[in-house]
Image (spheres, coloured by chain):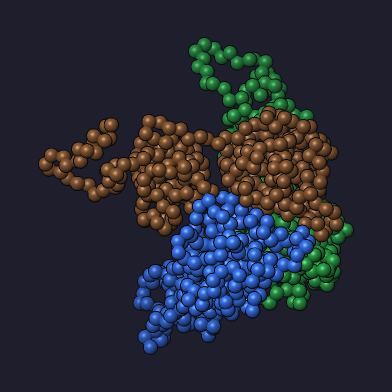
Chain colours: A blue, B green, C brown
Amino acid sequence: MSNGASGATLRYDTVTFLSDYGTADEFVGIVKSVIRQLAPGVDVVDLTHEVPPFDVRSGGLTLARSVQYICPGVILAVVDPGVGTDRKPIAIEVAGGAAVLVGPDNGVLAAAAGMIGGAERAVVLDRAEYRLESPGPTFDGRDVFAPAAAHLCNGVPLEELGTPIDPALLMPGILPLTRVDGDELVGEVLWIDRYGNAQLNVDPDEIGSWGDRIGITIGTSPRTARRAATFAEVAVGELGCIVDSYGLIAIVANRASASEMLGLGEGDEVRLRRLLDDDEVAARPAPTKVALGPSRTNPEAHARRDS
Amino acid sequence: MSNGASGATLRYDTVTFLSDYGTADEFVGIVKSVIRQLAPGVDVVDLTHEVPPFDVRSGGLTLARSVQYICPGVILAVVDPGVGTDRKPIAIEVAGGAAVLVGPDNGVLAAAAGMIGGAERAVVLDRAEYRLESPGPTFDGRDVFAPAAAHLCNGVPLEELGTPIDPALLMPGILPLTRVDGDELVGEVLWIDRYGNAQLNVDPDEIGSWGDRIGITIGTSPRTARRAATFAEVAVGELGCIVDSYGLIAIVANRASASEMLGLGEGDEVRLRRLLDDDEVAARPAPTKVALGPSRTNPEAHARRDS
Amino acid sequence: MSNGASGATLRYDTVTFLSDYGTADEFVGIVKSVIRQLAPGVDVVDLTHEVPPFDVRSGGLTLARSVQYICPGVILAVVDPGVGTDRKPIAIEVAGGAAVLVGPDNGVLAAAAGMIGGAERAVVLDRAEYRLESPGPTFDGRDVFAPAAAHLCNGVPLEELGTPIDPALLMPGILPLTRVDGDELVGEVLWIDRYGNAQLNVDPDEIGSWGDRIGITIGTSPRTARRAATFAEVAVGELGCIVDSYGLIAIVANRASASEMLGLGEGDEVRLRRLLDDDEVAARPAPTKVALGPSRTNPEAHARRDS
């Protein structure tokens, strides 16, 4: 599939493409047309173009989640609120040349590069002969990044495309860390997916020894989620806590949107708390009981909670 | 286009792909990346990824409408609310091996399989060596179905991919039938398309001998639709009844949304009634008439309606 | 990439495809499946399928903006409110055969054809042997246009596909012109892009000698926009006036939607006015001043404005 038309040998036959361009305008199609004309035989695989406009964090996290499954080749990521300013257009070689990431130096590439071994070499894409002449300075996807991706596929060496830059000087990405606050593990929502699942920046090991139920606090409302292996183990109306398809902890519901149930958005703080057996009972939603006599609450539970 | 890169001969060079993944997340791109790495030279044609989340009925009907136009090869359909449970991931061979349908055994494949001759052989995709190792059990599109599709394209025999299962034991699809109730033909909305046209499960033959106008009742409000060959024959503000591009009866409007005009949704019941000449007149929306004297209604019409 | 599977030599290996089909229904996938079956080895590049339903003007402008970047080959544009009527399905050869535009003769192809030299030859796609047999007359994308595109790629001569028609008789496109009204240049919004930038039908030369600030009137509210080379030069909350990536004047904001700030839609009238130095001061949003004594407004400014 790769090199019939051109007859030439391609260095890479795949460009994987992520952007915040959306698909209502022709931006994505034009970037592909430019690549196709400069490097016939290369296929473009769309990762997504619905990164929210200008949302470098979201684009960078999407790329980082995906990168281990992406084809060897060029990875083109254009979320670029600073287009036309002095932010640098760059190409980063990783994994011994198995992949080159192309995009703006604003952090969108950084987490993905880190996931596959880190930037080994990088250049600033500043050579006019490898750009399209542009009627205006606002569409670097077409005029700077697409040509660079195509030339890399054709075998133009990285160092030909621009001025070398020390990878240590590139803009870092943001991968928020968890922290412990008293008896709570404080995490953050990395991603709300189409189904409303909320992926947290929490590794399963961080709550490995905890019980079957996890206390969750968002804002001031405490909830309980059931540990589950699949969505189906979560009862309707209940929250689940699963290891998601990327190996991170996610708050989910069964055929419903956990993020809607909780009013959660990307970047929101989520506090997780280990529940003891009695906490679990107490935290479970229960039918309201009307107690006319003295409280029958288990005194041992109280004792434990005080300890 | 199919086998340049790999040098190998592909059994199938096309995977046609439908899902409820949407395109805002990277799910579709990752499935394609997995297929491309396992089976270089295969192209993926997107049918749609905007099946409403978990809507097996809608996905199955979309596939059934489309299947006669789809390229020979693998047809991958992932609408899978039961992912991770004991619902079976399956592959179904149809049409003497011209196509293999891959997806969950929840009915989403069934109507399409039926449209092209029915399932001839089927397997449960239970061989670990043909799956990706997964960090979590919730993304079978990536870990189970994409690898199966790729291996089928590469020529791995169906029976290699998993344990044979009797096609008669697969989950059936839902193709709702019309029924007659008194003088009405009771149908159902199969599909509301982008333009608001409402496709019914009604074959043109079922109303073949009826007149130029068709009585339509949705809920309790009776309307009249004009039989037409094209949208343009329907006057503005009027409803039309056409044979749509799939050969089924659809309720339409001219450059407007019939489903919005009628408040129709997929799955809604629609009652069709044969109109006699006088009924047509009576059923037409008419200016309100204020009659001061005795009614001038045609007595013959009354007589007929009573007969 | 182009001709491995078929072994045959393709005349064109690319179909660039624009439509108002959306991507929720299977229309786009079916058109691609038909092309792929009739012309294996051809790739389809999506320009966009989210042209608003029936919006011939928007589709035509999108195509005209894009055409200089599109791959040589077939350009398929289906925005077709008159499908099934006597509007003609056509193919137009341009640029000495470098491209053929295929679609309905309703103006959607006209501006793009004009951008690349004008229609040289045209035919009406009226040969049944180059169409699919259709169960209904409402999906010409599948039954008429996709087969024509595929046959053109395969090398079927234009004149084989249908009856020649004089290009001068084709429906013209709409490219609205600016006009001068007193001291105002009256333009129109051609396009609101995903980021809310409003492209006008104004060439930079038309306001070349004007100053750093441009008066803008939409409806009755006068505003001022700053001339800028990039989005970043525009202050937050301010409007900018840039030369966009297509070489036209656009009203923009920095990381915000200018069209939302102004309530602008496609097709809206925008009046531009040259600002003199004092006008600039007067037109700037300023804190409200309470003047207890006689007005201190610069009398010279008044004089000038009256002149």
In this orientation, which residue lies closer to the viewer: A111 or B165? A111
> Is residue C196 positioned above or below A128 on the image?
above
Q: Position of residue A93 (x, y in %)?
A: 60, 74
> Is residue B298 positioned above or below B168 on the image?
above
Question: Does any portion of residue A222 appear in the rendered image?
Answer: yes
The residue most toward the top is B293
* Left/right of residue C190 with respect to residue C294 in the rendered view: right
* Left/right of residue C279 with respect to residue C169 in the rendered view: left
Q: Residue at x 58, y 13 (%)?
A: B296
> Is residue A262 positioned above or below B175 on the image?
below
The residue most toward the bottom is A307
In this orientation, which residue lies closer to the viewer: A300 or C90? C90
* Quadrant of image for the C terminus of chain B: top right
The residue most toward the left is C293
Q: Residue at x 49, y 38 (%)?
A: C267
In this orientation, which residue lies closer to the viewer: B200 or C56? C56
Specify the quadrant of the image occupied by residue C137.
top right
The residue most toward the right is B96
